[in-house]
Amino acid sequence: DIQMTQSPSSLSASVGDRVTITCRASQSISKYLNWYQQKPGKAPKLLIYVATTLQSGVPSRFSGSGSGTDFTLTITSLQPEDFATYYCQQSYTPPRTFGPGTKLDIQ
Amino acid sequence: EVQLVESGGGLVQPGGSLRLSCVASGFTFSSYWMHWVRQAPGKGLVWVSRINSGGSDTNYADSVRGRFTISRDNAKNTLYLQMNSLRAEDTAVYYCVRDWYYQDTSGYHNFFDYWGQGTLVTVSS
């Protein structure tokens, strides 16, 4: 199975900050990488697919980059509703493994 | 509006069985692959099982293979997960998830575009 790692595991930031979350795959996955956001007590929500494509309705302050093994999720100008846990997921080959998550909370 | 509504969770003893259901609405259920994804309390997301649109092909995580069975009834727009020989480590919120894809020159890029609200399964004596 492809192993996904994320860094940092947690992150404190303030409203208006720019933050970057990193995801790394144990082997090359081209651009087969998705990002999800999960708020406490809620189901995850798709943010980005194919590493860089924003899901419909997702604010443009979210962006994704990368290919191969290294990927990033960037949020510019953090808003209060962005404080959540973020997961990456590879869809290169089954099983579609998730990263362990990065918890973003308010500083 | 796409909706996925899970039910069937609850408290069960180790070794017991439970069947989860997920009723879909707002889209042509029979056209989509579907999955179950679980999340243990305070932990991350773990893919459990997948079924193709017609129900003829299934796939399972190693941790549940031989104990769980995914199925669907397209006439009823319903996805199921039959869980047998339950263990404490199966305790989790189980999400019903729709699979969609984006196609480009490199192939099909799949992603989970809609999730249900989840149903909690607790395995404990």
Image (cartoon, rainbow, N blue to C red):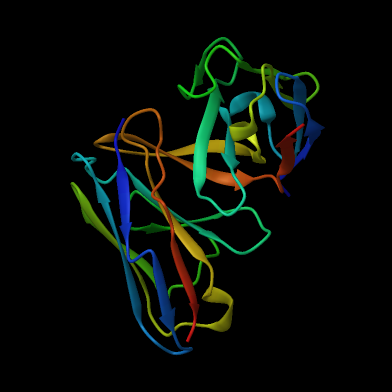
Tell me: residue A42, above or below residue A96: below
Q: Residue at x 46, y 61 (%)?
A: A86
Q: Quadrant of residue B85?
A: top right
Front one among B2 and B84 = B84
Residue A97, horizontal then vertical, whole percent: 40, 38
Residue A55 in sight in this render? yes
Front one among B89 and B51 = B89
Residue B8 in sight in this render? no
Quadrant where the image shows the N terminus of chain A: top left
Residue A56, horizontal then vertical, whole percent: 52, 59
The number of numbered discs placed on residues in the rendered structure image is 0
Residue B9, horizontal then vertical, whole percent: 78, 35
Front one among A104 and B55 = A104
Q: Residue at x 58, y 77 (%)?
A: A81
Tell me: residue B5, above or below residue B79: below
Tell me: residue A55, above or below residue A61: above
Residue A25, horizontal then vertical, whole percent: 25, 45
Q: Quadrant of residue B14?
A: top right
Quick check: B62 left or right of B18? left
Front one among A63 and A10 = A10
